[in-house]
Image (cartoon, grey):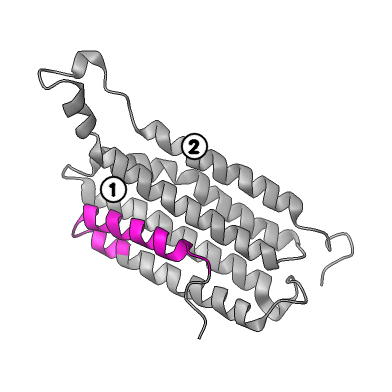
């Protein structure tokens, strides 16, 4: 049961989380290295920039994914009115994984066109599976018996978000499995999932 001191607005957790999301999104660009003059060769800068395509793909995929996660995090906390220690830990675990994401993004960008690309793709997609599972746990804990949610919440909104986080881990698990066949296809699927799941209201109400 929540103590009176725990029954407070979630503004602090949202502000802190927004900052972590913003930092993680900013760090992603550090994986794109500026071509050095000494490494240009006869083809020139244009060819070197085109050669960075794995870095562009990894950056756009990770940025889109984190943006979708931020949108869903915001939507969840639109309905969460109260917080307690366990919810803080769930949110902390989620932020830990979000801040880790720039590493598998850089790993994917570096190894995508090479022989170890499949493993790099699996690490990237596997991280997204862990994030999706944590999102699911966060929502399930907050929505259990509606004890942390606003009283005016529509039951259809609860079911909608529950379905979204029920399917998310499964879809990212598919991307994880595909990575062992093609890292490029896995990254492309992760990009599509980021765009698809990021839309508010998915899956649509009946």
The outermost residue toward the left is 42
C-alpha separation, residue under disc 2 versus residue under disc 1: 21 Å
**Position of residue 111 measured from the top left corner of the image (x, y, whole percent):** 24, 41
Q: Earlier in the sequence, mark 2 or mark 1?
A: 2
The stretch in magenta equals 175-200
Residue at position x 31%, y 24% from top?
A: 34
Tell me, for residue 26, which label it has, or none: 2
Q: In this view, does 29 lie above or below 83?
A: above
| Residue nearer the viewer, 115 or 189 | 189
State left or right for residue 44 relative to residue 23: left
Image quadrant where residue 103 sits: top left
Q: Is residue 27 above or below residue 176?
A: above
Residue at position x 43%, y 42% from top?
A: 102
Q: Is the magenta stretch mostly helix, strand or loop?
A: helix
Query: Helix, strand, or loop for circle 2?
Result: helix
| Residue nearer the viewer, 150 or 169 | 150
**Position of residue 85 measured from the top left corner of the image (x, y, whole percent):** 74, 59
Query: Helix, strand, or loop for circle 1?
Result: helix
Q: Name the residue under label 1.
A: 120
Q: In this view, does 94 lie above or below 46?
A: below
Image quadrant where residue 194 sits: bottom left
The outermost residue toward the bottom is 206
């Amino acid at each position: 049961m929540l103590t009176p001191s725990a029954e407070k607005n979630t503004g602090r957790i949202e502000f802190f989380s927004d900052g972590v999301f913003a930092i993680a999104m900013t760090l992603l660009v550090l994986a794109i290295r500026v071509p050095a003059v000494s490494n240009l060769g006869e083809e020139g800068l244009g060819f070197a920039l085109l050669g960075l395509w794995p870095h562009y793909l990894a950056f756009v995929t990770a940025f889109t994914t984190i943006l979708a996660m931020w949108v869903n995090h915001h939507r969840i906390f639109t309905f969460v009115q109260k917080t307690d220690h366990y919810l803080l830990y769930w949110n902390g675990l989620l932020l830990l994984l979000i801040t880790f994401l720039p590493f598998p993004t850089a790993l994917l960008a570096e190894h995508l066109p090479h022989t170890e690309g499949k493993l790099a793709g699996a690490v990237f997609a596997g991280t997204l599976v862990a994030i999706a599972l944590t999102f699911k746990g966060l929502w399930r804990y907050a929505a259990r018996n509606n004890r942390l949610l606003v009283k005016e919440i529509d039951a259809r909104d609860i079911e909608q978000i529950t379905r979204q986080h029920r399917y998310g881990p499964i879809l990212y698990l598919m991307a994880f499995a595909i990575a062992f066949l093609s890292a490029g296809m896995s990254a492309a699927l992760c990009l599509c999932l980021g765009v698809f799941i990021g839309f508010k209201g998915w899956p649509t109400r009946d």
